[in-house]
């Protein structure tokens, strides 16, 4: 076990578990989260140490749940934070940055961050088969990292997935299984398979480790802004993995004395799949699942696993959330490209 990882703790009841391939509390069925020895981390984790390391996600390794030297993800992360002055002017704000995670290695999506951490942990715990439920980008990343690590790989996807995303995964040689249904149907089936076969599903039984990889987004933003937190950060919400972990990253850096400032965190969803935003606008904690109907398929998750924690993080930060129509998404893509 990492000298800085104390174990797993339930987000709801606080019950503690040992490090293992589990994601649900045996006491109350709440989600498990990695717990760290922050006092020990504070002794060694400095800006100077971080800045001396290679520009990848592992420069923040003390705050990630792995032991020893990482085997994969050596080129993932540390993506550009682009100052977008013309876009800022078009939107009427003074200062605006875009975190361009479309250049992550090796599959050009943010998923390379979380998969690097989850599969590193799977290797550490002795698994030889990795898997996932996916709308495309995650399957691409799991397939690529499994190939790099020489692991067996199965990916489970909706049967109506765009051909380009299917090719993006199958080129690496996984066993691809298409399911007649949407992402939520695929996810339910994979939960049963994970239990039956004992495979490492990065976003199911390895979810506590997988989600920690999303913190690197927040770590990088703070470092790239000169160890200052932004006043506002807008994060898209699908299953709800990223946003609460960006909040956790900001909180950890603040508690360790590495950053200044306070960030208000804002959630964005497509109107055709906006269960979290609907709950936020109704001022309720109850997230009602929806059937997705949007062109933004990568974030079209109608029953978000961590939706409640998105609400919690946004409210605690003093932020807010909005949904946008498919036409507004297209207009936004064009505006971003043009400016």
Image (spheres, grey):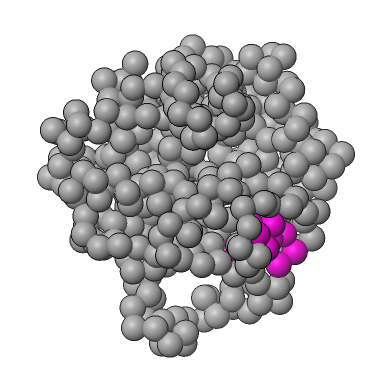
- Residue at x 18% of width, y 48% of height: 257
Compared with 33, 77 (above or below) is below
What stretch of residues is rendered in magenta?
268-279
Residue 286 placement, left or right of 184: left
> Quick one: quadrant of the N terminus?
top left
Q: Position of residue 71 (x, y in %)?
A: 38, 25
Taking the image as drawn, is residue 124 in sight? Answer: yes
| In-front residue for pair 153/324 | 324
- Main SS, magenta region, reads helix
- Residue at x 68% of width, y 35% of height: 133
Task: Please state the total of marks drawn on the protein image.
Answer: 0
Q: Position of residue 130 (x, y in %)?
A: 59, 23
Residue 173 placement, left or right of 8: right
- Residue at x 46% of width, y 87% of height: 90
| In-front residue for pair 314/148 | 314
Taking the image as drawn, is residue 233 in sight? Answer: no
Indicate yes or no whether the magenta region holds residue 24.
Answer: no
Q: Quadrant of residue 202?
A: top right
Q: Position of residue 87 (x, y in %)?
A: 44, 81
Q: Quadrant of residue 201?
A: top right
Indicate yes or no whether the magenta region holds residue 274.
Answer: yes
Q: Position of residue 266 (x, y in %)?
A: 49, 64
- Residue at x 67% of width, y 21% of height: 194
């Amino acid at each position: 076990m990492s000298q800085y990882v104390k174990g797993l703790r339930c987000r709801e009841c606080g019950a503690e578990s040992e490090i293992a391939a589990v994601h649900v509390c045996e006491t109350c069925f709440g989600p498990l989260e990695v717990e760290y020895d922050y006092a020990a981390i504070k002794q060694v984790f400095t800006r100077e140490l971080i800045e001396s390391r290679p520009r990848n996600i592992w420069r923040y390794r003390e705050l990630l749940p792995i032991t020893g030297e990482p085997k994969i993800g050596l080129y993932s992360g540390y993506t550009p934070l682009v100052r977008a002055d013309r876009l800022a002017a078009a939107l009427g704000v003074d200062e605006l940055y875009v975190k361009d995670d479309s250049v992550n290695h090796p599959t050009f999506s943010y998923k390379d961050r979380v998969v690097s951490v989850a599969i590193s942990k799977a290797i550490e715990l002795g698994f030889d088969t990795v898997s996932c439920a996916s709308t495309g980008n995650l399957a691409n990343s799991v397939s690529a990292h499994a190939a790099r690590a020489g692991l067996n790989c199965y990916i489970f996807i909706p049967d109506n997935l765009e051909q380009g995303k299917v090719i993006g995964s199958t080129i690496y040689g996984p066993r691809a299984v298409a399911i007649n249904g949407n992402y939520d149907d695929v996810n339910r089936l994979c939960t049963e398979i994970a239990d039956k076969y004992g495979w490492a599903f990065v976003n199911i039984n390895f979810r506590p480790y997988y989600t920690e990889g999303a913190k690197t987004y927040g770590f990088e933003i703070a470092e790239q802004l000169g160890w200052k937190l932004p006043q506002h950060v807008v994060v898209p919400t699908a299953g709800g993995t990223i946003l609460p972990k960006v909040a956790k990253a900001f909180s950890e850096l603040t508690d360790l004395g590495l950053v200044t400032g306070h960030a208000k965190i804002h959630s964005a969803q497509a109107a055709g799949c906006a269960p979290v935003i609907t709950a936020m606008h109704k001022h309720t904690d109850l997230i009602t699942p929806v059937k997705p109907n949007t062109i933004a398929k990568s974030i079209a998750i109608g029953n978000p696993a961590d939706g409640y924690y998105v609400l919690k993080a946004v409210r605690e930060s003093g932020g807010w959330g909005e949904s946008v129509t498919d036409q507004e998404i297209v207009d936004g893509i064009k505006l971003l490209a043009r400016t």
